[in-house]
Image (cartoon, rainbow, N blue to C red):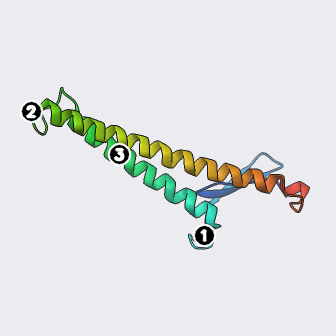
Amino acid sequence: TAVGLYEGLWMSCAAQSTGQLQCRLHDSLLALDAHVQTSRALMVVSLLLGFFGLIVSIVGMKCTRVGEDDPITKGRVAVAGGILFILSGLCTLAAVSLYAARVTHEFFNPSTPVNAR
């Protein structure tokens, strides 16, 4: 008998009364709710933007010899890396806010059974 059911972006878990925790990955991407698919996509985009922001920022640093020797160009490249980091953070903020709003909505929904909260 499961004591608690936990569902996340990547897997769902069930906690047993014995203290055992069983987790499994979601079976199908298309079978998930729209808010979970959207949150997963935003998190993947956030990771990609953060990675590219890191690469661009390293190229734009004054201490690296990659790219042009012009300090104005290096500064613009560094700013572009910062913009990528900001966009990455906004994608993460949107994903977390969307998922948290949905969880809160389901928790306070009167038609949700008490034992499923």
Q: Position of residue 85 (x, y in %)?
A: 39, 41
Q: Is residue 3 left or right of residue 8?
A: right
Residue depicted at x 68% and y 49%: 100
Q: Is residue 109 left or right of residue 8?
A: right
The Cα–Cα distance between marks 3 and 1, rounded to whole angstroms, is 28 Å
Q: Could you say which quadrant of the image residue 80 lies in?
A: top left
Q: CA distance from mark 2 to mark 3?
A: 24 Å
Say which of marks 2 and 1 sits in front.
Answer: 2
Distance from label 2 to label 1 (Cα)?
A: 51 Å
Q: Are marks 2 and 1 in contact (CB under 8 Å)?
A: no
Residue under pointer 2: 69
Q: Earlier in the sequence, mark 3 or mark 1?
A: 1
Q: How many numbered discs, if any?
A: 3
Q: Is residue 79 above or below residue 43?
A: above
Residue nearest the observer in this picture, 63 or 82: 82
Identify the residue under disc 1.
Answer: 27
Which is nearer the eye, 106 or 6?
A: 106
Identified by mark 3, the residue type is Phe
For label 3, the crowd category at 10 Å Cα-Cα, with few meaning under 14, some 14 to 19 and many 20 or more, is some
Check disc 1 and report its element: helix, strand or loop.
Answer: loop
Q: Nearer the viewer, residue 17 or 74?
A: 74
Q: Which residue is mark 3?
A: 51
**Is disc 2 placed on a helix, strand or loop?**
loop
Q: Tell me: 57 left or right of 21.
A: left
Q: Is residue 8 above or below residue 37?
A: above
Q: Residue at x 10, y 38 (%)?
A: 68
* Image quarter in which the N terminus is found: bottom right
How crowded pointer 1 is (Cα within 10 Å; few <14, some 14-19, many 20+) is rated as few
| SS label for mark 3 | helix
